[in-house]
Image: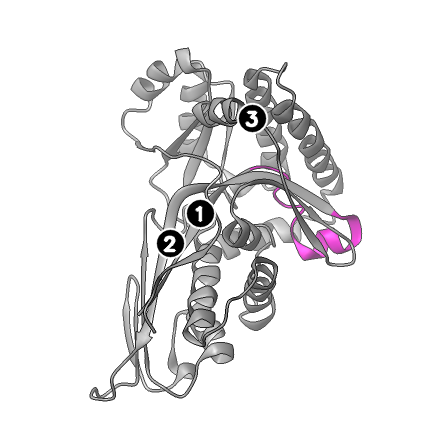
Amino acid sequence: MIISQTPYRVSFFGGGTDYPRWYRENGGAVIGTAIDKYCYVSVRNLPPFFEHKHRIVYSNIELVDEVSEIVHPAVNGVLQEWAGKAGLEIHHDGDCPARSGLGSSSSFSVGLINAMAAYHGRMIGRSELMREAIRIEQDVIKEDVGSQDQAWAAFGGTNMIHFETDGRINVKPIIMSDERRQALSSQMMLFFTGISRIASEQAAQTIDNLSSKQANLHEMRSLVDIALKLITDESKSFTELGKLLHEYWKIKKDLTPNVTNPHIDAIYDTALGAGANGGKLLGAGAGGFLLIMADSDKQFEIRNSLSGLTELTFNIDAPGSRIIVYQP
């Protein structure tokens, strides 16, 4: 059996500029971090004693004879490229719900590719792992997704990721002291809105607005550079970063109005009223996890005001996808 462990992510600034249709013409950049919540994918040979050749276990169970019969898009796409002749059993487990804005779909794709590479006796580098996941998601199964989630899943860490017009993707770790990193982590709170959504469907609406909302995208990109300075300059308070995130969220709502709804707006306004500096929905929006940034002396009141929601505690700067069990 082979088991991969792949992190989820929290994206701070720049989301939307990582869509190929945008950065191939304008370039793009994002800032965010991998967190210590993980997707686990196990792969093993399925003995040839069953009526089916492959067993795929996630929120559903698929029993099939041919890869082409697999319904799960990512499993179908990856196994088209990576399956051998033997039957396979694949299991997926995760620390967080799917479709919640934490990049879980790409974490699964990256984790499955990493596990399948190990299954075939290959050690796959982080850049290749990222590129292969992007290719599978964007070109093979044709999903409307960006290119940042695959990078977080493969590389881990707290990074600024640059998307170049020639297609290159450069992952640059953000250098800061341990004390600064802990201070950043302590400012962040995550609350589950109770709403799940399909990211590619939500993202398709953002992509449709790229041409008509170019000013929004350019402004969102400019905030990435400001955020980097606020994160790395130890003379700066993270209160300023939270307020910048609030401005970013307003721009994102204007870019794609259906990124939010009255229920989510009410949650966010409640957090602001309790002392939050800022926040945003993670991922493509319309549900999932709400990131709140707040000074430590305000967090008790925020938790009380949002007591009806589930809070996810986490640490930042988690490592990228890795094989944690290798027993071929």
**Three-letter residue code for mark 1:** Tyr
Q: Which residue is mark 1?
A: 8
First along the sequence among labels 1 and 3: 1
First along the sequence among labels 1 and 2: 1
Helix, strand or loop status at disc 1 = strand
Q: Which mark is residue 177?
A: 3
First along the sequence among labels 2 and 3: 2
Q: Considering the image in quadrants, where does the C terminus appear?
A: bottom left
Label 1, residues with CA under 10 Å away: few <14, some 14-19, many ≥20: many
What is the distance, in whole Å, between disc 2 and disc 3 at their CAs?
Answer: 28 Å
Label 2, residues with CA under 10 Å away: few <14, some 14-19, many ≥20: many
Q: Is residue 287 magenta?
A: no
Helix, strand or loop status at disc 3 = loop
Colour pattern: one colour
Magenta-drawn segment: 12-27
Q: Nearer the viewer, residue 155 or 190?
A: 155
Q: Quadrant of residue 194?
A: top left
Q: Nearer the viewer, mark 1 or mark 3?
A: 3
Q: Nearer the viewer, residue 293 or 267?
A: 293
Residue at image location 59% in from the left, 22% down from the top: 241
Q: Is residue 18 magenta?
A: yes
What is the distance, in whole Å, between disc 1 and disc 3 at their CAs?
Answer: 23 Å
Q: Residue 37: x and y, percent?
A: 38, 44
Q: Which mark is residue 39?
A: 2
**Three-letter residue code for mark 3:** Ser
Residue at image location 58% in from the left, 51% down from the top: 205
Label 3, residues with CA under 10 Å away: few <14, some 14-19, many ≥20: few
